[in-house]
Every structure is written in C-alpha cells, then in structure tokens.
Amino acid sequence: MDLGLKGKKAIVTGGTRGIGRAIANLLVEEGCDIGICARTASQIEEAVTAFKAKGVKAFGSAVDVAVADQLTRFVKSTAEVLGGLDIFISNVGALGGSNDEASWRKGFEIDVLGTWRGCETAVPFLEKSGAGAIVVVGSTAGIEVVGPRRAYSGMKAAILPYIKSLARNLASKNVRANVVSPGSVYFKGGVWDLMERKNPDRYRQALNRHPTGRMATPEEVANAVVFLASPRASFISGTNLICDGGMTQRVQF
C-alpha cells in the first residue's frame, strides 16, 4: 500500500534508536524528508548519514527535550531546513520506573512538558501543511495498572486528554492528532534487553503474561505510527491506538 508520504516533511524526537529509529527509517523508506533529535550527537550523525543515503533530505540535532529552548529551537530549525513540516512525532520518554519525587518531576518535564512543547511549536507549521499530523508514542502503562506505583504510568496517562483536545481544536485546520500506545517492546540496548540480562526471572514473568509469548519489535510499533501519520488515516484523529498484541485486558468501547 502506498501511504502517500512521498515528499512529506517529518520530525521524530528520539529518532536514533529503538521505536524512534524504526519510525524514522520507515518514514524515509516512504519518501519523507526527515528531522530527528536525540541526546547523543554521534548517533544523530550516523542516522542522518544513513537517511541521506536513501535520497531524502535529512537534518538532526542534539537535544535534551527537558530543556525548553533546545526542543523549540530544533523544531523551528528543522522546519526551516526542510522547507515546512507535515508530520510531528513525539517519541521521547523518561521511562521513570520509580515512585519517588525525582522520577515524577523528570517524567513531567520529559513526557508531559516535552510532548506539549514539541506539539505546540510544531502546530503553526502543521497548519500550513494542509494535511498535518501529530502522533505521540504513549504506553499501555497509561491505560492499565500493572505492578507497583510509578511515575511513568501517570505521565503517559496525562498525555491522552491533551492529544484529544489537540484533535478537536485543530480539526478545522486540517491537522490530526493521535496516540499509539505500545505494550512491551524488545530491542537490543532497550529496557527489556537490560532486564533480560540483569533480572532474567522478571523478564520471563513478563513474557509469560503475554498471550503471544513475545514482545513487540520496534518495527511493529513504527508500522502503526507511520500509518496514523499518513494520508491513509486522513479521518482518524483523537484516538489512542493500542499496539500490544492483546496484552492488556481492558475492553475499548
């Protein structure tokens, strides 16, 4: 299926590894010009070089999304370099597994304010697109309680009403806004890879809870994100698409 993305201009935050890199890779394969940010400059350089080799325009910058002016400057610079913006994908997350105050503050700065800053900075450019799209990578942790109390779940839940309000308020400007909430995702260097090596018993317990007996790949999540960002999903806005292989038990009416 042609997703109608050729020539579109997209931003992916946290676009050098894991889910973010898989999203950026797929957007480039579909013919998008791309802008990515992450905290490690060497990883950005590698990714941008790889994207340019595919024949698209690519731009990257080292950014800490918890620092307001770094993220807003990156979004504006990318739109200038690419000549506009059609797609904004907010992927960076704090992954706060604790319930202490420091984890809540970090989660708020990165997951909530980082998402808000990025989206709000991107909106004026997306309004000029004529078919703008925002997709935020959430988590099933924001919709279903599993395990101990933790900041991560609260922060991911907080994003959902904000994105719904964006969808409602920007519909007349032809800008859509959606969330994709993955369950457990496994990739080398990721949280579950680390868990497998450091705490194999907990890792096996997580696998045993999953009806498929495995975790998602970053590419499987990217498929959902890129579809929602594409013109093929032109009448889907304000939704939270669960991408978990049937792991969660809640019924979505």
Image (spheres, grey):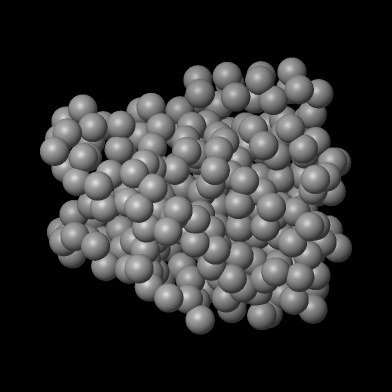
Picture layout, residue 142 above or below residue 220: below
Determine the residue positioned at 45% across, 28% down: 40
Quarter residue 56 falls in = top right
Q: Is residue 14 visible?
A: no
For the residue pair 82 and 210, the one nearer the viewer reads as: 210
Q: Position of residue 195 (x, y in %)?
A: 23, 36
Determine the residue positioned at 48% across, 71% down: 160
Q: Position of residue 64 (x, y in %)?
A: 45, 42
Q: Is residue 151 visible?
A: yes
Q: Position of residue 123 (x, y in %)?
A: 69, 63
Picture layout, residue 214 above or below residue 197: below
Quarter residue 45 falls in = top right
Picture layout, residue 5 above or below residue 15: below
For the residue pair 23 and 79, the one nearer the viewer reads as: 23
Determine the residue positioned at 74% across, 61% down: 233
Q: Position of residue 140 (x, y in %)?
A: 39, 61
For the residue pair 55 and 105, the one nearer the viewer reads as: 55
